[in-house]
Image (spheres, helix red, strand yellow):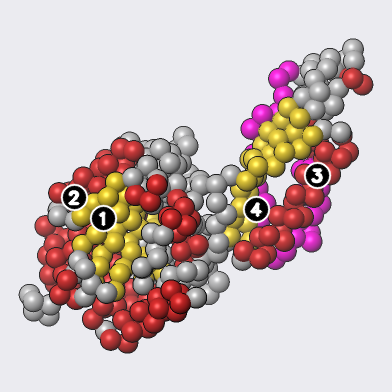
Amino acid sequence: MTRQDPRERARAVVTKCQDDVLALSHSLHAEPELAYEEHRSARKIADLVEAAGLDVTRGAYGLDTAFEATAGDGGLVVAITAEYDALPGIGHACGHNVNGSAAVTAALALAPLADELGLTVKLLGTPAEEYGGGKVDLLRAGAFDDVAAAMMVHAAPSDGVGMTSLAIGSWRVRYTGRTSHAAAMPHKGVNAADAMMIAQVAIGAYRQQMIPGGVVHGVVTHGGEAPNVIPGLVTADYDCRAESAGDLAALQARIRACFEAGALATGAELALEAVGNDYADLRQDLEMCGVYRDCLRDLGRRADAPDGMRGGSTDMGNVSHLVPTIHPGIGYDCGDTIMHNPEFTRYGTSAGADRAVLDGGLAMAWTALALASDEGHRARLLARLAERRAA
């Protein structure tokens, strides 16, 4: 390769900006923010890429903590999605400081090359992946209408390409009964805790017949006030997951019936409130996955996903149903811990995590360069975009 090779020019940009993007990753990690509240995080990223010359729109598409940053004016629009929300109490235990900073790395590496390769680079700040689904909001608002390919990398214990994820829907459950003295007048009460207990037993009994791949899990967030008071109010948060959106709808219908059984048996009133957006299953574009895998190998990494490997759930799944998408894992050593665990958080600014930011960003940049410069890839992606617009 010569110094004029676009990949080497992209690498040179990453080398030049690495101190800034790693400082960004560490700063996001130090000040974690929850879904739709990522004001500092969004501002940090927007400030960095704006200073680098990208055109930035803050509060994009009607979301206060979203942004759009673009470079180039080519016909092939590639969206790179940056995540930066954290988890309650345990901060960046899903590594979104790595995800967001890798996305910034890719956008900065591509920006000087965009026009000559017929690219428009669109860095999208996507809030609320952990809870709510900001990418679904952005889809509805038109952020992906002109996008021919979408990509991001996700922090993980190891590199992986091509994995799937489960569709998910979240509910807030509320049983309203009637409080009463638990000893003197229990017959005057309507026990909301019993309603929840019956629902949980019904869900447990249903697991034997549950649709393959279905998962139901939840927590009681309020269970009563005192042991000598019949609980008049019980609340819970519950998630249903399944391998497809259709399976999710079928599973939710059965789980809804379990909650209704609790109300019917006790006389309590049930309210089920959908929380955020439902997430679709992730469908990664195999040709783009192959390009990314080759790029990652050129960086000295391996990224082979075993058959049937799946992640949790992500709102990138909704994007993948509309736009050819990749969502590979970018790995770093995290000991024996697992994601969504407070121990994983402390590895988020390690040397391995920093390397993941740079390698993940450069691999995405090289992938975008390959998609733009190869006539076969370019034609396929633009044809898919034309079909979508015609539908």
First in residue order: circle 3 vs circle 1: 1
Q: Is 324 situated above or below 125? A: below
Callouts 3 and 2 close, C-beta under 8 Å = no
Residue type marked 3: Glu
* The quarter of the displayed image where residue 245 is located: bottom right
User: Can residue 100 be found in the magenta stretch?
Assistant: no
Q: Which residue corresponds to the image point at 65% horizontal and 53% vertical from the top-left?
A: 240
Q: Is 192 situated above or below 166? A: above
Counting other residues with Cα less than 10 Å from the Cα at mark 1, is it few (<14), some (14-19), or many (20 or more)?
Answer: many
First in residue order: circle 3 vs circle 2: 2
Label 4 and label 2: CA atoms lie apart by 40 Å
Q: Which mark is residue 260?
A: 3
Per the image, the residue denoted by label 4 is: 240
Per the image, the residue denoted by label 2 is: 50
Residue type marked 2: Glu
Residue type marked 4: Cys
Q: Is residue 380 left or right of residue 266?
A: left
Callouts 4 and 2 close, C-beta under 8 Å = no
Callouts 1 and 2 close, C-beta under 8 Å = yes
Label 3 and label 1: CA atoms lie apart by 46 Å
Label 3 and label 2: CA atoms lie apart by 52 Å
Label 3 and label 4: CA atoms lie apart by 16 Å
Per the image, the residue denoted by label 1 is: 69
User: Can residue 208 be found in the magenta stretch?
Assistant: yes
Counting other residues with Cα less than 10 Å from the Cα at mark 3, is it few (<14), some (14-19), or many (20 or more)?
Answer: many
Q: Which residue corresponds to the image point at 75% horizontal and 33% vertical from the top-left?
A: 175
Residues shaded magenta? 198-226
Q: Nearer the viewer, residue 270 or 308?
A: 270
Counting other residues with Cα less than 10 Å from the Cα at mark 4, is it few (<14), some (14-19), or many (20 or more)?
Answer: many
Label 4 and label 1: CA atoms lie apart by 34 Å
